[in-house]
Amino acid sequence: MLPWSSAPVPPVAGSAPPLRLFDTSTGELRPTAPGATARMYVCGITPYDATHLGHAATYLAFDLVNRVWRDGGHDVHYVQNVTDIDEPLLERAIRDHDDWVVLGMRETALFREDMEALRVLPPRHFIGAVEAIPEIAELVGKLLASGAAYRLDDPEFPDVYFDISATREFGYESGYDTETMLRLSGERGGDPERPGKRNPLDALLWRMAREGEPAWDSDLGRGRPGWHVECTAIALNRLGTQIDVQGGGSDLSFPHHEFGAAHAEALTGVHPFARHYCHAGMIGLDGEKMSKSRGNLVFVSRLRADGVDPMAIRLALLSGHWRSDRIWEPSMLAEAEARLAAWREATALDSGPDASDTVARLRTHLADDLDTPNAIAAVDAWAAEARERRGRDAEAPGVIRAAVDALLGVAL
Ligand code: 5CA
Ligand code: ZN
């Protein structure tokens, strides 16, 4: 798939401290340690509805990881998928008498536009599940051959499942106990009740064709891929056997990222698959997680159509900490609009206070587990002083504008 385009990122003078991020698998805040190339995989959308503020907040968090690494001189190899074939997409298409292919294409196009408007830097590879089916089927074939996967003893639908005992570490990524894993598996697309599985937690790798469902030919038989293995194949084939960050919202910690890790590690023997598993908090509205199934959504495209400046949406979502669950309030947007106006006014002045300390603070806060509230406060302080006409540095407004653009992704 074609990713979206981006404006060039301006250079910022000075050096950046290494980025520390909270890793779910160890429960620790640890430095990321990418080589010259930093490798990141962030789970993409299931395109059956428009991008809501929850999705946007998650992609903005990983956009900051991308930006901080680039600022540190790394080449960032960023890969993202689109789950353009899966249960929720098919169910929505049937409900709305829509064609699932057209629905997926339409919502993916809208997502691209939203990401571009929010100035999220595009992934280098943006890969749909459908276009990846041959490579996913090949990976499932390898798991079957190595004994990490098995066929269900069901004469009608001999689907292929992953055996969780294939790696000794199953469960390390989320850290949940069996009871919690069983509950979440049932709630998040798994089928712990299905008879004939070796372990109720075992996850679907290949679903044999059912009447009326889309299916593709492969050596496994006609069918379609399971969800987790889609991301494993797309990531492994582009980023290699070990990546720096696997990202997504906190609802993906189990089962999705647990199985992503288990599939990859069973295949390659390299543990851990990701050096950091990073999970963004959930954005809610009216006290509930914003989700397509609950229908309590605020869409980025709706706000844009209403004339809201995408930079205000971006700043509003960055005003909270990326890992905390937070409730979206319209007042957050009003506050962000006021802040944006103040920053624009300050950076349009012909001089201001020296910028180097502010840029250093911006970098330090972002490197500290993407502490955007404090990073934003540092810019607020500079803008307030500039607007009081304190400081006579003619370079400073331009330096701040470039730093806010490069590091926070906000165009002033
Ligand atoms: N296609 C899969 C990932 S492979 C998927 O989860 N798609 S999604 O459209 O449901 O979600 C896309 C991303 O947005 C995921 O990282 C998910 O964790 C995140 N997300 C979904 N709802 C919210 C929310 N309310 N707040 C924050 N992030 C969210
Ligand atoms: Zn995924």
Image (tube, rainbow, N blue to C red):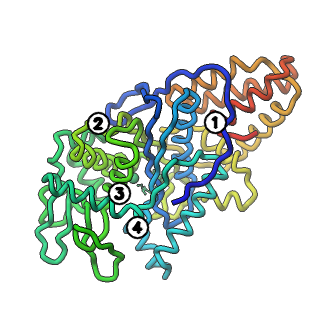
Residue 151 relative to residue 295: left or right: left
CB under 8 Å between discs 4 and 1: no
Q: Who comes first in sequence, dot 1 or dot 2?
A: 2
Residue 408 shows in the view? yes
The CA distance from mark 1 to mark 3 is 31 Å
What mark, if any, has residue 338 been given in the picture? none
Secondary structure of residue under mark 4: loop
Residue 341 relative to residue 231: left or right: right
CB under 8 Å between discs 2 and 4: no
The mark lying in front, picked from 1 and 2, is 2
Determine whether 293 is above or below 285 in the image: below
Question: At which x and y percent is residue 397?
Answer: 80, 27
State whether label 2 is within 8 Å of ligand 2: no
Amino acid type for the residue under numbered disc 4: Ile
* Dot 1 alpha-carbon crowd within 10 angstroms: few under 14, some 14 to 19, many 20 or more: many
* Dot 4 alpha-carbon crowd within 10 angstroms: few under 14, some 14 to 19, many 20 or more: many
What mark, if any, has residue 272 been given in the picture? 2
Residue 189 shows in the view? no
Q: Who comes first in sequence, dot 2 or dot 3?
A: 3
Question: At which x and y percent is residue 295?
Answer: 51, 64
Determine whether 67 is above or below 119 in the image: above
Determine whether 114 is above or below 99 in the image: above
Secondary structure of residue under mark 2: loop
Amino acid type for the residue under numbered disc 2: Pro
Q: Who comes first in sequence, dot 4 or dot 3?
A: 4
The CA distance from mark 4 to mark 3 is 10 Å
What mark, if any, has residue 408 been given in the picture? 1
CB under 8 Å between discs 1 and 2: no
The CA distance from mark 4 to mark 1 is 33 Å
Amino acid type for the residue under numbered disc 1: Leu
What mark, if any, has residue 230 been given in the picture? 3
Q: Residue at x 52, y 52 (%)?
A: 55
